[in-house]
Image (cartoon, rainbow, N blue to C red):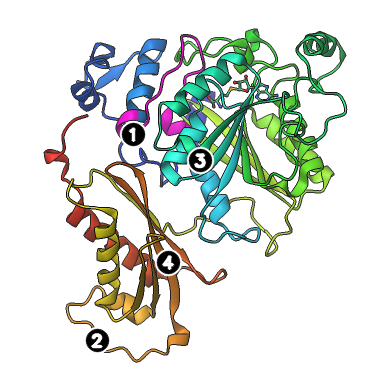
Amino acid sequence: MKNKRKREQPRPAIHPRNKYSEKPPDFALLASFYPSFKPFVFYSRDGRPRIDWTDFNATRELTRILLHHDHGINWWIPDGQLCPTVPNRSNYIHWIEDLLLSDIIPRPNPNQDNVRGFDIGTGANCIYPLLGASLLGWRFVGSDVADVAIEWAERNVKSNPQISDLIEIRKAGTDASCSQVEDPYNENSNLERKVDHAVRDDCYSGPPILYGVVRDGETFDFCMCNPPFFESMEEAGLNPKTSCGGTVDEMVCPGGEKAFITRIIEDSVKLKHSFRWYTSMVGRKINLKFLTSKLREVGVTIVKTTEFVQGQTCRWGIAWSFVPPVKKIISTHVAEKPNLSFMLQGLQRQSSAFDVLQSIESFFRVSGASCKLNVSSFCVDISASNNHLSGIFKEDAEENLDEASGNINFRISVFQQIPGTLLVKGSLQQKDCPVSGELLSAFQRLEVVLKDKFCQTKDSSNPP
Ligand SMILES: C[S@@+](CC[C@H](N)C(=O)[O-])C[C@H]1O[C@@H](n2cnc3c(N)ncnc32)[C@H](O)[C@@H]1O
């Protein structure tokens, strides 16, 4: 009865910009492209292709090929390290993207160029920097304390030269040029502290997390963290339904996630404006309540929470800031911001980013909008009225008498993500101007036109 009621509750949806929101990975198709994945795929009685989620090798191979197939990323982790699920981890990235795009706090960087994030505990898998850099061109510092994590995170970055310049891997607690800590961490004292700690209380006393790792004068748009959730390996248990690996270092810290995130909160009080947004994943709802009230105590200006879809389990996200909000917040949910970006994947060989740029220019110019192509920064600056934008959908553009002052000024930039994949990103030049329905529709139309013109159809694309 209890279970039934649980199932009836509406589950939060996968993030709409998540690559897998409309189409979950097709195991049969992937197996046909990747022979190494084939042995892990079997068919259930209803004919659906499946994998054994309790087999670490199967989940690791799935992650490897999804990162390769959908993100152009080369990736590997040694046996037993925590294996991330790509669709789940992408949700957290898109939630941060929503925060950065929202007008909750002022946006010093309305175009979202040069976004810089800090991934606390990046792990051997380095999943968040790899996803954030490849999907959105973000720069990252990924920190960790475990040698194996640092070694493999660095390997994973180096295996991806197309984004390796965007990611720095940093060992926490070993840098002299960091924000000052009174009692710097060292390996021996940590062990004593861990033991001491276990008998004392549930405060964090491990290596530095942010304060002592962030360097003097460094600033970031956000930090993110998938913390060690558990207080002991027994508490972590073994989920009989999945095998995602995970070592003691990755899963456990004295005091569990509550202590770990509380330390991030304490660090944020010291570092305040070094980050625009502080965020963390939270594994237990009861901790979410505790952390929210802790944040109110320390005087943050904003607290936001969200719930992530994680297969059978729930995870939450918590975000806070010390930047004064633009307007009074009445809801704790981040408003959906219309999306002005899309990817062009599987570009035909003969098509270049410049061709795409020229097509964007002529797409808007034919409706009478004024366009300025900037070749050196690969963008087009456009000034258009709503009439111009709706003219895009008419056969013959009407003569437009709109005053230039009523125009919407926006920029469309083209970024190369990996060979054959471009990110097309629109951004409004006027900070507080809302995205009109006409602009949104024109942008959606642009996506269709460009995909039609430049991208190979699925049937003609070569399997990797
Ligand atoms: C749950 S794992 C997350 C790994 C990866 N980010 C992911 O989402 O799969 C937590 C990571 O935090 C690291 N860690 C623990 N204490 C840390 C600290 N003080 N600073 C940085 N990383 C830490 C662990 O070594 C581990 O790699």
Q: Is residue 82 magenta?
A: yes
Q: Are marks 3 and 4 in contact (CB under 8 Å)?
A: no
Characterize the local packing of mark 4: few (<14), some (14-19) or many (20 or more) Cα atoms within 10 angstroms. some
Identify residue for label 4. Answer: 411
Mark 1 Cα-neighbour bin, 10 Å: few <14, some 14–19, many ≥20: many
Which residue ends up furthest to the front in the rendered image?
Answer: 376
The answer to whether residue 448 is above or below residue 58 is below
Q: Nearer the viewer, residue 59 or 183?
A: 183
Nearer the camera: disc 2 or disc 1: 1
Magenta residues? 68-92
Distance of mark 2 from mark 1, alpha carbons?
Answer: 43 Å
Say above or below: 308 vs 74.
Answer: below
Q: Quote the CA–CA distance across marks 2 and 4.
A: 23 Å
Q: Is residue 123 left or right of residue 320?
A: left
Residue identifier under label 1: 72
The residue carrying mark 2 has its beta carbon less than 8 Å from ligand 1: no
Q: Which amino acid type is shown beneath numbered disc 2?
A: Glu
CA gap, disc 3 and disc 4? 23 Å
Which residue is identified by label 3? 93
Q: Residue at x 75, y 21 (%)?
A: 207
Q: Which mark is residue 143?
A: none
Query: Which of the four quarters of the rendered structure image does ligand 1 lie in?
Result: top right
Name the residue that disc number 2 marks: 398
The label nearer to you, 2 versus 4, is 4
Q: Position of residue 20 (x, y in %)?
A: 35, 38
